[in-house]
Image (cartoon, coloured by chain):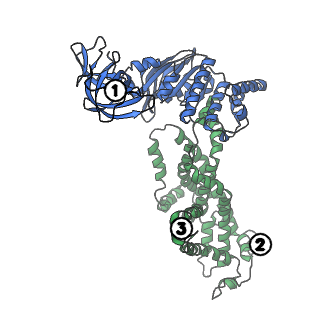
Amino acid sequence: MAVSVDEAASTGPVRDRTPRARRFGGRGRSVLEVALLTVLAVVMLFPVLWMIETSIKENRDVYAIPAKFFDFKVTLDHFKDVFFSSGGGRSSLSVSFLNSVVVAGISTVLATVLGVPAAWAYSRFAVKAKKDQLFFILSTRFMPPVVVVIPIFLMYRQLGLIDTKLGLILIYTAFNVPFTIWMMKGFVDEVPAEYEDAAMLDGYTRLQAFRRFTLPLLLPGIAATAVFALIFSWNEFVFAIFLTSGDSVRTAPPAIAGLIGGTTVDWGLVAAASVVFALPVLVFAYLVRKHLIAGVTLGAVRR
Amino acid sequence: MAGIEVTALHKRYPDGTVAVDHVDLSIGDGELFVMLGPSGCGKTTTLRAIAGLERQTTGDIRIGDTLVNDLPPAERDIAMVFQFYALYPHLKTRDNLAFPLRAEGLPKTEVHERVDEAARLMRLGPLLDRRPHRLSGGEQQRVALARALVRRPRAFLMDEPLTNLDAELRADMRTEIKHLQGELGTTMVYVTHDQVEAMSLGHRIAILNKGRVEQIGTPLEVYDRPASLFCAAFIGSPPMNLIEVEVADGKLRSKSGLVLTPPPNLPRDRGLVAGVRPEALEVTEPGAEGSVPARVVSAEWLGDEIIYVVDHDGRRDVRVRMPPTVRFAADAPVGLRHTGGPPPVYDVSTEELVA
């Protein structure tokens, strides 16, 4: 959801050109606005900056009192520790990262593969009690996931899915499918059904018409939806910590959390692991940022 | 080319809504047949059933001699033009036109020939290498028409093709479509909610309401003798005045005494409503012979005519079409007189034409 915050922030400058903003300072942005935004930026960004700083400090400097902001020696040892264990070979953290990639990736793909055709069907066909069905699908997202952790845990124990990647993939897919259906239905609604009608008159079956004409027009929407699903799966913590325990199965969030709690905490390692953990999602969201904006503004375009 | 027979067509959606309620249509070979009605009347559903985009619940559809109930759209040999044009956005005009032909697997030279012919017919020469997003609405619709032409189908189905164009362009395209259909002689089923379009295009018009056919007839028949109160209120701008009348001494009289020429064989035993066109009434000086007193509520100067709205029988919505030379001020006391022949008369309770 971090991405949606970025989007909201990027519309800021546009809003600031309204007359209301000008009333404060005369030309351009008012001093008050700049001051408020600065304070907000510092509050929001300081933890991130501190995390990055800590990840490249030597342990001595990490624990130094008073804290060292600028005057410290840069080291990449912590990052090395994230990936390699001290005795050589892969560290358990790197295994967790790989697990995260596998679990988030597969669950996102599954949710997309299941959700997009469902959204298309809900958008195009007259389905009995369509609104009720859609409401039911959405209702699975009404409560916080935490509420169902215990029942899921008991079910998974019966099914032998505890401590398996498959278990996590299934539960993340289950959470992402409703979201995908709802978000994609909006995108499908925007693509005129006439394209498919015309293609069917030209000799294609309905599915071919969907694949050849509607699907390409949906790609920006699919990209945006998949990014949101991916971020959810990537960041998910509660289910991961309840349903998995083994180092070989655990995803990154519980693994990083697991670093804290001993008698001593290697803050440098925690920070480095967090940086590595945060990067892929940021990069991915950055790459598809155009599609994300298209996704957010699609409904505003008159056809 | 072929006629289209629709027999007892019925379409019920899974949620229980009945979109088309046992509709029968017999569309002649080479006819330009218009289906007219308000939104939700079932006209588009009927058209989509003919196209094969929607499967009817019961009923038969024949195109030519073929029963097409179970044929997919592509095998019905028809072409359809949509309200939103539905040009493939990633293809240039030329390829949009060629697309259905290539899908059929025609040889390259013939595809080329037919595309050129359609482009010439619709004057698309300069647009052939553009993509849809670089075409204006009118141009897109011409391309869409050309794409229907290249197929040389047995019938054209038009789903409100002019709704998204501005008024001037719409009038031009209307002429163009009518001319084209006459030239090619291909059967065309044309769906619209615009009565002007229906009147000016159709050889025959079917008026639909709530999934049923209310009337089928030539534009003149539909205009002169609407088959039901619904048709009477729907056709004409301004619409017919529906005036409550009774039969007395062989005459047709409104409550306040306006005398109408009575049609023969009027039933006397029920409440009647006469449908009087605005041009069959006349606003006169107060007290003129055969007139009843009325009052001008408002006047709309349209240049070539004036529409007077007058007060009659306590209803303030009787519309009278007058030449622009006859001028009365708003609120002026006037006379109201019937000048036309016998008006169609309807039964109040069944809403059907009785005489």
Look at the numbered disc 3 and give the secondary structure of its residue: helix
Towards the viewer: B280 or A99 = B280
Colour-to-chain, blue: B
Could you tell which of marks 2 and 3 lies nearer the N-terminus? 3
- The residue located at (71%, 26%) in the rendering is B120
Q: CA distance from mark 1 to mark 3?
A: 57 Å
| Label 1 crowd bin: few (<14), some (14–19), many (20+), radius 10 Å | many
Q: Nearer the viewer, mark 2 or mark 1?
A: 1
Res. A112 mark: none
Residue extending farthest to the left is: B249
Residue beneath label 3, please? A22
Q: Is the residue B275 above or below the residue A116 in the image?
A: above
| Residue occupying image coordinates x 27% and y 26% | B286
x and y percent of residue B255 in the render?
Answer: 23, 24
The residue that mark 1 highlights is B241
Q: For residue A88, which numbered disc appears in the image?
A: 2
Q: Amino acid at mark 3?
A: Arg
Q: Is residue B201 above or below residue A94?
A: above
Query: The numbered mark 2 sits on a residue in which chain?
Result: A
Apparent side of residue A82 relative to residue B254 in the rendered image (left or right) = right
